[in-house]
């Protein structure tokens, strides 16, 4: 279809055609088109089929108000045609269609609506029960809208997101929002202005009406130019706000122009103050067949003509409730649409200037009339107009029926902001009755219609917002208040809940997306769902893709009318975020990247390490594809291995009260630390669970170096300070975990390897087990060396500055080459330590067991009550208890299917515990297990049954309870 | 024909009743737990002089906000028994209440991303199977067979190592359960009072005697606090301290799509679960705001987190759009097991709190035994592991392995 | 809903920088003669009215200080003198 002649309001460039595909055929739009305007211009009227009845649905709003115009674009379902810009080569398809949009096989369902009263599915299909799964699958197939195409692609619209700060954020770039931004910016603060559409201007953008001798669209351009020129206003267009959250956090996403930094990106703006100027839309008129293609709000048709140069139809009937419809009628007549009649639900209160203009244009004006029923199926072909008092009716032919019941405010941002809203009996709209701190409202959503009044209210809100953010604008505010007072106030609204004479069987839709009709509202109320929040849930009003937009205020008004509730007590339903649906990948932005790499990551990767996530880190778990790690283990036991233990927590605590702090959080007597010696101890929580273990070394007076488990490294400072928060103690605590890397050199040949790279005296006498030395390695690397034995062999833990760790690793590998040194990973370490009976927190401990239950009670200094050790009261209490889980060792019988970690321990019909760690140990020659089992079964020598059933076939294996130190119980090897 | 007429001319599911000054049993909270308890009191125990007081509308609380996932593969045997019985109760209720609760028996797939998580699965699977409940360990390929949308490569931040598949689980329509129970309770004579808010609890000599409400005082002999996350607030009225912390938990849905996700999928590492509702939306949630909170406000942060997580392990969702988010309360105990107890602090006071985010699946079965507890004034054996006293004895239920940090729910 | 907290050292910051340490319960009671019940009540039993109450917060993503703030769980907002 040819476009209308060029006009100053147009946002298209007809000289740049854009070719695309629709429903298998070729079509053409122009630059500036949205998918919807291009399809409409190409003659498409039926865009989709509705959810329940498969009724034909056409273009309704132009801002994504409903799912009517959802299309699949290049295989991506549920794209809103109205808000998606047309791009060359797009392949566009209609959704929820069997056959073609015009001729849909399921269209027959429309005849059976009588059999589908509100909530019918709750009362059908469940008897007999065995049939339900069959119906369930049919229902599932009928429901849903778009089809998701399987794809393994992880590509995103761009790994970008933006975090902003502002004194004032303004939501809405119409005249009120622009005036607010300009006023707020006068104070010098940073202002962010967010507009969902491609251009600033709001409802002025397409209006040619002259005010003070200037066309309104010109006024919009002028304001927009001033905003653009203002250095402290940042403007974000095509950037719908998804919500305004607590304390004025504005979130949304921005759709970038071609060649932008991303296709779309998520933004968040933390603003001191916020101005909401989101404007109004037309409130849908609920009348029979109000969903027929060709029935739309007046603005939609008007914008098609003014902005996109598309003639929306040939013969139009208006059924409005607001002056904007009168203006639209005059304008559309000017664009060449024959206007058959303009009905208006209001009997009086019209703008006399517009009424006169309508008369001059020779258009029939019918105040006190509205639309009662639309004719036609795939296209509207006519309308039955009715008098509001139900008195008379008249049939008119038309191919465009522009209907509304007045305006409604776009309360979304206010609702997410938790403003209190009330129905205003003058404007006929929901309006804020109480605003949260530093939030302000302006513009037509206050019921203002006069453009000067709208701008004045914007200016006032902008100044107040800037003042709330700290600018002293008292005198300006006073003036702005006067300006608002002197401008025309809110206009009277339209109070029509729905068209007169709606019959019981009529399909008058309150909600298009879910095919929720007036009749369904009545049925919901009859079944007890007589307040909007309940009816919404029962009948599904406002639960579809358009959410609140179409049914929102109408649902409340109709329910109130049914219940006879006075209008001033009208209550709506909550509008929930997101106000505009963001795509998940845009919201996700750069996405997740939560794991750290150790300084030895690359060195290990080069040796074939297989990494796994472990707490906050990526760690080497295996060094071969033999996941039993036999070689790694054997080499540590018989020779020497090296482990990257960098994630180990490393801390320094010092100060006059450092020891008191240690006494508080460790269970042992920490006054017994000695220079040059590692003291092993543990921390508990208030229920006596093991939280952490590690060693503490006194490195000076009131000065200690200590280690924690990797998992606790991040929480240790917090833990110390929490448990001493009431005491006012003086100590400093520094987390050195990331600063220092760590290597564990372990095995009978560990000393020989280390000796090659340091001059320090490593003899057993000079540096015994549990010793601590600060040594120099290689070309002067300072190393804190701890002689510990977690894996049960002679071993040295070497803590060195992270940046030197690579060098240290190379030194060790070179020095160890002659002995056959090999790296080992977490799995081997876990096996080695388990053979030794050393626990890993969270593996051999859990919330049901205390330190004593897992055999570590010996660490606890039970006589100390003065330090108020964390966990001591619970340990004291539990020591007298029976019927608790205990940590035991198990020697597990040979079995065809070996038990694995997590398998349970049973007795008769009872579950009595579970295996924490179990391995077939080559070192021992049998399968050991560390298990938590009830104390009744814990005595050594007893046998237990282990039940495994991971895949539907049970097997039971026997085990004998033994001491949980399987390997070198005397500890001779550590001390060698 | 009469049946068709009834079908086409539905009548009120529950009739409004006048507020009486005295009831034998007053239940605070018109959620699943309160309504189910009232239903079983009247139906099974013949105690019909019962009022359910709901300050907003029935289902306002967690019962109308949850994602309705049901399963029985809990961590410990005591819980498995209860939840299994709960799972078996749904079809009975559908029939008894003559209401389609839309039980979608999809099975639940839980993902493990570490060796430790696999061990935890083996424990839960072993316990379930030992108690006769189906649950099995799957490798990543088998996971993808169930849910083709999963990325089982090593590209996600948390690569998938195994899955725990639990065929008996699935989802229901949460609101339908509330309405059906209200229908059933009202049919047996229970009074359901909406818009009645309890503002005080009256006691006399160590006994509960009634409640104060915005609509006047009501006397009762037995009082059930079954107010979900608001139970802690109600307990403050009588100075009862609890190891329970109400936190908001958030959920959201995408725009509706034709069926492609045929099972509930969840992951601890991602803090996410997702299901596709019968209407086609992907319903997803799991994160909690970590401070106590009686509001039901969602947060921008978790809304975003959910998108980060979902697109990481199901990248096919990248162009799908979120349509709505909301939140409700999850009343967390340190061991993630509930508290059901009788004569707590006062004679005649019955407590049902701490269901966290498990209270939907157990709603009706809890109601059944709570009714028995109130009717017989004695704690039924199956719920005896869930008394308040366990926290004074340091005997945690172990529904989570994690040890508590600072006394409130913070693991 | 998102809110902000005032760290005594860093000033007003986004909530997600902080960790909640729960309600203020006063210093740890003396352990001499402390009953198990009294201990467990101190450690984990709470009364949580929907009203402003003192809490401990940790500025983990900031300066690392524990501080007391007053917050109302009914509004989920910090109560600050002067708003
Ligand atoms: C987002 C979310 C997702 C969840 N997902 C699941 C899930 O998938 N599976 C699962 O099993 N569970 C889930 N849960 C948990 C589950 O919803 C709850 O545990 C369950 O609904 C609790 O039911 P209830 O009847 O005890 O309480 P509620 O449903 O909360 O009902 C309590 C009622 O008490 C009323 N009330 C409160 N105070 C007063 C007063 N003073 N006077 C009168 N009335 C009062 C409230 O208005 C409320 O309606 C989820 C929860 C949430 C919030
Ligand atoms: Zn700070």
Image (spheres, coloured by chain):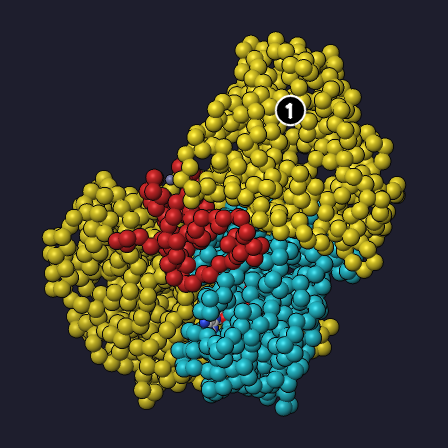
Chain colours: A yellow, B cyan, C red
Task: Tell me where residue B155 sits by quadrant.
Answer: top right
Which residue is under mark 1? A770
Q: Viewed as shown, does residue A469 lie left or right of A743?
A: left
Number of callouts: 1
Of the four image quadrants, the one with ligand 2 is top left
Instruction: Indicate whether A80 appears above or below B279.
Output: above
Task: Tell me where residue A759 sits by quadrant.
Answer: top right
The residue at 66%/10% (across/down) is: A756
Q: Quadrant of the C terminus of chain A?
A: top right
Q: Position of residue B270 (x, y in %)?
A: 57, 47
Q: Viewed as shown, does residue A386 lie left or right of A465?
A: right
Q: Viewed as shown, does residue A792 lie left or right of B4?
A: right
Query: Relative to the observer, which residue lies in front, A168 or A133?
Result: A168
The residue at 34%/72% (across/down) is: A404
Within 10 angstroms of label 1, few (less than 14), some, or many (20 or more) residues? many
The extreme bottom residue here reads B2
Query: Relative to the observer, which residue lies in front, A586 or A34?
Result: A586
The residue at 47%/32% (across/down) is: A658
Instruction: Indicate whether A534 appears above or below A649.
Output: below
Task: Tell me where residue A213 sits by quadrant.
Answer: bottom left
The residue at 42%/73% (across/down) is: B199
Residue A598 in view, yes or no: no
User: Which subunit holds the residue at mark 1?
Assistant: A
Q: Quadrant of the N terminus of chain A?
A: bottom left
The yes-or-no answer for disc 1 within 8 Å of ligand 2 is no
Residue B92 in view, yes or no: yes
Q: Considering the numbered disc 1 on the image, is that residue within a helix, a strand or a loop?
A: loop
Q: Position of residue B218 (x, y in %)?
A: 46, 82
Q: Position of residue A62 (x, y in %)?
A: 38, 59
Q: Position of residue B380 (x, y in %)?
A: 68, 71
């Amino acid at each position: 279809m040819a476009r209308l002649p060029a006009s100053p309001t147009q946002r298209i460039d007809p000289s740049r055609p854009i070719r695309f595909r629709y429903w298998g055929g070729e079509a053409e739009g122009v630059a500036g088109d949205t998918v919807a305007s291009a399809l409409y211009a190409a003659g498409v009227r039926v865009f989709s089929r509705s959810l329940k009845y498969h009724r034909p649905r056409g273009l309704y709003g132009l801002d994504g108000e409903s799912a009517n115009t959802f299309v699949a674009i290049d295989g991506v379902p549920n794209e809103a045609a109205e808000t998606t810009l047309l791009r060359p080569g797009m392949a566009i398809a209609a959704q929820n269609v069997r056959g073609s949009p015009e001729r849909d096989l399921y269209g027959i369902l429309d005849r059976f609506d009588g059999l589908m009263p509100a909530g019918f599915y709750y009362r059908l299909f469940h008897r007999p029960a065995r049939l339900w799964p069959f119906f369930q699958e049919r229902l599932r197939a009928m429901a849903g809208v778009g089809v998701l195409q399987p794809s393994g692609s992880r590509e995103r619209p761009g790994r970008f997101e933006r975090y902003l700060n502002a004194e004032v954020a303004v939501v809405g770039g119409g005249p009120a929002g622009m005036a607010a931004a300009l006023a707020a910016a006068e104070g010098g603060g940073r202002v962010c202005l967010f507009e969902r559409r491609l251009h600033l201007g709001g409802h002025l953008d397409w209006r040619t009406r002259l005010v003070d001798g200037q066309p309104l669209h010109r006024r919009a351009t002028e304001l927009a130019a001033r905003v653009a020129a203002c250095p402290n206003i940042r403007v974000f267009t095509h950037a719908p706000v998804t919500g305004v959250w607590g304390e004025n956090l504005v979130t949304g996403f921005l759709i970038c122009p071609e060649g932008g930094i991303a296709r779309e990106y998520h933004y968040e703006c933390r603003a001191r103050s916020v101005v909401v100027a989101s404007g109004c839309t037309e409130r849908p008129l609920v009348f029979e067949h109000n969903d027929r293609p060709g029935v739309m709000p007046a603005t939609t048709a008007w914008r098609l003509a003014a902005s996109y140069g598309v003639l929306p139809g040939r013969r139009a009937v208006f059924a409005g409730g607001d002056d904007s419809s009168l203006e639209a009628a005059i304008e559309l007549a000017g664009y060449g649409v024959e206007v058959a009649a303009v009905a208006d639900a209001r009997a009086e209160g019209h703008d006399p200037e517009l009424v006169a203009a309508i008369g001059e244009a020779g258009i029939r004006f019918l105040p006190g009339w509205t639309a009662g029923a639309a004719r036609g199926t795939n296209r509207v072909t006519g309308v039955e107009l009715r008098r509001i008092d139900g008195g008379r009716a008249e049939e008119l032919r038309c191919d465009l029926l522009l209907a509304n019941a007045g305006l409604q405010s776009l309360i979304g941002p206010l609702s997410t902001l938790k403003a209190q809203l009330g129905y205003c009996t003058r404007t006929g709209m929901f309006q804020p009755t109480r605003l949260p701190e530093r939030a302000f409202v302006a513009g037509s959503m206050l019921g203002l219609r006069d453009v000067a009044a709208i701008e004045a209210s914007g200016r006032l809100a902008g100044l107040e917002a800037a003042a709330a953010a700290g600018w002293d604008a008292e005198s300006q505010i006073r003036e702005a208040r006067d300006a608002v007072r002197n401008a025309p106030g809110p206009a009277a609204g339209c109070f029509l809940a729905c068209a007169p004479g709606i019959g019981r069987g009529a399909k008058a839709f309150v909600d298009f997306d879910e095919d929720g009709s007036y009749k369904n509202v009545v049925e919901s109320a009859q079944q007890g769902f007589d307040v909007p929040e309940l009816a919404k849930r029962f009948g599904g009003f406002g639960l579809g893709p358009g959410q609140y937009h179409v049914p929102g205020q109408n649902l409340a008004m109709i329910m109130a009318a049914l219940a006879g509730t006075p209008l001033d007590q009208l209550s709506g339903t909550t509008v929930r975020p997101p106000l505009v649906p963001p795509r998940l990948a845009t919201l996700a932005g750069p996405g997740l990247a939560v794991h750290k790499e150790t300084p030895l990551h690359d060195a290990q990767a080069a040796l074939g390490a297989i990494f796994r996530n472990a707490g906050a880190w990526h760690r080497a778990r295996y060094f071969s594809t033999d996941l039993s790690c036999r070689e790694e283990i054997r080499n540590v036991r018989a020779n020497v291995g090296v482990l990257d233990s960098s994630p180990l927590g490393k801390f320094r605590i010092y100060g006059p009260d450092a020891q008191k702090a240690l006494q508080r959080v460790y269970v042992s007597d920490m006054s017994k630390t000695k220079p040059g010696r590692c003291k092993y101890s543990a921390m508990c929580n208030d229920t006596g669970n093991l939280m952490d273990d590690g060693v503490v070394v006194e490195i000076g007076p009131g000065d200690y170096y200590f280690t924690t488990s990797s998992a606790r490294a991040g929480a240790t400072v917090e833990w110390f300070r929490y448990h001493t928060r009431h005491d006012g103690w003086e100590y400093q605590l520094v987390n050195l975990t990331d600063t220092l890397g760590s290597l564990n050199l372990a095995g009978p040949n560990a000393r020989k390897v280390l000796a090659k790279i340091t001059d320090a005296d490593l003899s057993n006498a000079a540096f015994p087990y549990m010793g601590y030395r600060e040594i120099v390695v290689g070309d002067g690397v300072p190393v804190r060396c701890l002689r510990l034995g977690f894996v049960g062999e002679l071993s040295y833990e070497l803590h060195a500055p992270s940046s030197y760790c690579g060098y240290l690793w190379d030194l060790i590998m070179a020095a160890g080459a002659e002995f056959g040194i090999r790296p080992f990973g977490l799995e081997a370490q876990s096996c080695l330590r388990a053979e030794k009976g050393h626990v890993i927190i969270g593996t051999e401990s859990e919330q049901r067991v205390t330190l004593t239950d897992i055999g570590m009670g010996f660490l606890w200094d039970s006589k100390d009550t003065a330090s108020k050790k964390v966990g001591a009261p619970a340990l004291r209490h539990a020591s007298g208890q029976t019927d608790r889980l205990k940590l035991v060792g198990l020697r597990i019988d040979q079995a065809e299917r070996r038990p694995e970690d997590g398998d349970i321990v049973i007795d008769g019909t009872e579950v009595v515990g579970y295996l924490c760690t179990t391995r077939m140990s080559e070192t021992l020659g049998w399968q050991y297990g560390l298990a938590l089992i009830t104390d009744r079964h814990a005595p050594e020598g007893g046998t237990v049954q282990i039940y495994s059933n991971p895949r539907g076939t049970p097997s039971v294996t026997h085990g004998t309870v033994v001491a949980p130190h399987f390997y070198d119980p005397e500890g001779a090897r550590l001390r060698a | 024909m009469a049946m068709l007429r009834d079908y086409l001319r539905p009548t009120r599911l529950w009739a409004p009743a006048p507020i009486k000054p005295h009831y034998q049993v007053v239940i605070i909270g018109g959620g699943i737990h309160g309504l189910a308890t009232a239903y079983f009191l009247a139906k099974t125990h013949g105690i019909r002089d019962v009022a359910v007081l709901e300050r907003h509308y029935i289902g306002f609380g967690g019962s109308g906000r949850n994602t309705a996932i049901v399963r029985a593969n809990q961590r410990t045997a005591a819980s498995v028994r209860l939840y299994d019985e709960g799972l078996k109760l749904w079809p009975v209720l559908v029939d008894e209440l003559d209401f389609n609760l839309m039980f979608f028996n999809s099975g639940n797939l839980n993902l493990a991303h570490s060796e430790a998580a696999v061990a935890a699965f083996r424990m839960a699977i072993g316990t379930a199977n030992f108690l006769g409940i189906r649950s099995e360990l799957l490798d990543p390929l088998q996971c993808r067979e169930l849910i083709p949308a999963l990325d089982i490569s090593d590209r996600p931040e948390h690569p998938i190592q195994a899955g725990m598949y639990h065929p008996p689980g699935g989802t229901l329509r949460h609101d339908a359960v509330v309405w059906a129970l209200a229908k059933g309770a009202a049919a047996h004579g229970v009074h359901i009072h909406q818009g009645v808010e309890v503002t005080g609890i009256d006691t006399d000599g160590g006994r509960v005697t009634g409640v104060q409400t915005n609509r006047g005082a009501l006397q009762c002999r037995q009082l059930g606090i079954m107010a979900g996350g608001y139970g802690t607030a109600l307990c403050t009225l009588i100075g009862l301290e609890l190891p329970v912390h109400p936190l908001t938990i958030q959920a959201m849905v995408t725009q509706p799509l034709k069926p492609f996700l045929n099972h509930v999928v969840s992951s601890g590492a991602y803090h996410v679960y997702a299901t596709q509702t019968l209407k086609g939306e992907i319903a997803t949630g799991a994160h909690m705001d970590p401070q106590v909170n009686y509001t039901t406000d969602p947060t921008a942060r978790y809304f975003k987190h959910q998108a980060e997580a979902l697109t990481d392990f199901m990248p096919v969702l990248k162009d799908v759009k979120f349509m709505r988010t909301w939140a409700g309360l999850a009343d967390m105990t340190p061991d993630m097991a509930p508290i059901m107890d009788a004569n707590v602090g006062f004679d005649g006071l019955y407590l049902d709190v701490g269901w966290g985010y498990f209270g939907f699946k157990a709603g009706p079965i809890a109601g059944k035994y709570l009714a028995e507890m109130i009717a017989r004034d004695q704690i039924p054996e199956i719920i005896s592991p869930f008394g308040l006293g366990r926290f004074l004895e340091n005997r945690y239920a172990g529904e989570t392995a994690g040890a508590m940090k600072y006394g409130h729910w913070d693991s | 809903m998102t809110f902000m907290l005032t760290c005594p050292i860093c000033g007003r910051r986004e909530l997600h920088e902080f960790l909640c340490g729960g309600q203020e319960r006063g210093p740890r009671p003396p352990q001499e003669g402390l009953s198990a019940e009294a201990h467990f009540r101190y450690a984990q039993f709470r009364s949580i009215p929907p009203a402003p109450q003192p809490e401990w917060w940790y500025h983990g993503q900031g300066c690392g200080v524990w501080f007391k703030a007053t917050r109302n769980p009914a509004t989920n907002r910090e109560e600050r003198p002067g708003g």
